[in-house]
Amino acid sequence: MSYHFEFGWLLEYYPEIIKGILITLELIAIGGVLGISLGIFCAWVRALGPAWLKPVVATYIELIRNTPFLIQLFFIFFGLPSLGLKLSELTAANLAMVVNLGAYSCEIIRAGIQATPKGQFEAGESLAMTRFETFRHVVLVPSLQRIWPALSSQVVIVMLGSSVVSQIAAEDLTFAANFIQSRTFRAFEAYIVSTAIYLVLAILLRQVLAVVGGFIFPRRAAR
C-alpha cells in the first residue's frame, strides 16, 4: 500500500492555520508574562516572604508540579462552573497556562535566589532597605540573570504543552490541525505541517527570549 503526500490542498485551510498560530502566540504571550510574574511573587514568598503565606504557596507548587497539565486545564474549564465561575475556552486556557508556568518558574527563580551571596542581602540591610526592597532592587535582577536560560527553556516547554488546550476546543494550532484532519482524513499532511510550525515557533521563541535576556541583562550579553 502506497501513500502519496500532497500539501497543496492545505492552502485552502490557511485561515484556520493562521488563526491557530495567533491563538498559540497569544497563549504563550499571556502565559509567559503573567506566569513568570506569578513565579517571581511565589519565589519571593518562599525565600523572604511572611511565614504564614509560605505553606499556601508550597501547597500550590506541589499540587501543580505533581499533576498533569491536562487535568489542571479540565479542572479550570469543567470544574469551576460548578462553583459558579464559567470561563470561555480561551480564558480557561490562558488561566491554566499562567497557573502552570507560575509554579514551575517559581522553583527556577527560587534556585537563582538561593544562589545569591549573603553579602547582597546584608548590603541591602545596610542601606536600610526593607526585605521586599532588598529583594526587588538587590536580589531579583541578578537572580533572573543567573537563571534566564533555564527560565527560557521552561517557557518553550509550556508553549509546546499548550497543544492540549485543543481538548477544551480552544482554537490553537493543534485544534486547527485536528479540524483539517477531521474534514480531509489527510492526517500525515495536517500533522506534519503543524509539527513544522511548532518547531519554527519554538526556535523563534527561544531566540526572542535570548534577545530579551540580552536587553534586560546587558552585562550578560557583553560577556
Image (cartoon, grey):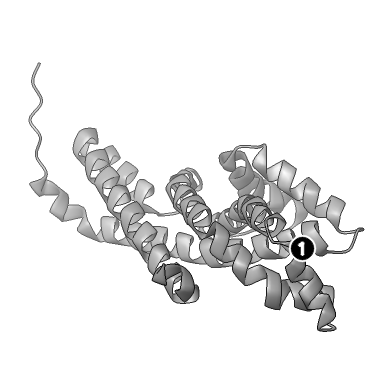
Badge 1 density bin: few <14, some 14–19, many ≥20, Cα 10 Å: few
The residue drawn where x is 71% and y is 55% is 114
Image height of 127 relative to 87, above or below: below
Q: Please indicate whether residue 133 sits to the left or right of residue 207 in the image.
A: right
Pick whichever, 165 or 56, lies toward us.
56
At a point 51% along the width and 51% down the height, the residue shown is 154
Residue found 74% across the figure and 57% down from its top: 84
Residue 83 position, x and y percent, is 77, 53
Residue at the right extreme, as displayed: 52
- Taking the image as shown, residue 223 lies to the left or right of residue 60, namely left
Where residue 44 appears, x then y in whole percent?
A: 75, 63
**Residue reaching furthest bottom?**
127
The residue type indicated by label 1 comes to: Lys
Q: Which residue is mark 1?
A: 118
Q: x, y percentage for residue 220?
A: 46, 68
The C terminus lies in which quarter of the figure?
Answer: bottom left
Front-most of 217 and 152?
217
Identity of the residue furthest to the top in this view: 1
Residue 140 in picture, x, y percent from top left = 66, 69
> Seen in the image, is 152 located left or right of residue 19?
right
Out of 60 and 146, give the one closest to the viewer. 146
Apparent side of residue 197 relative to residue 93 in the rendered image (left or right) = left
Total marks placed: 1
Helix, strand, or loop for circle 1?
helix
Which quadrant of the figure contains the N terminus?
top left
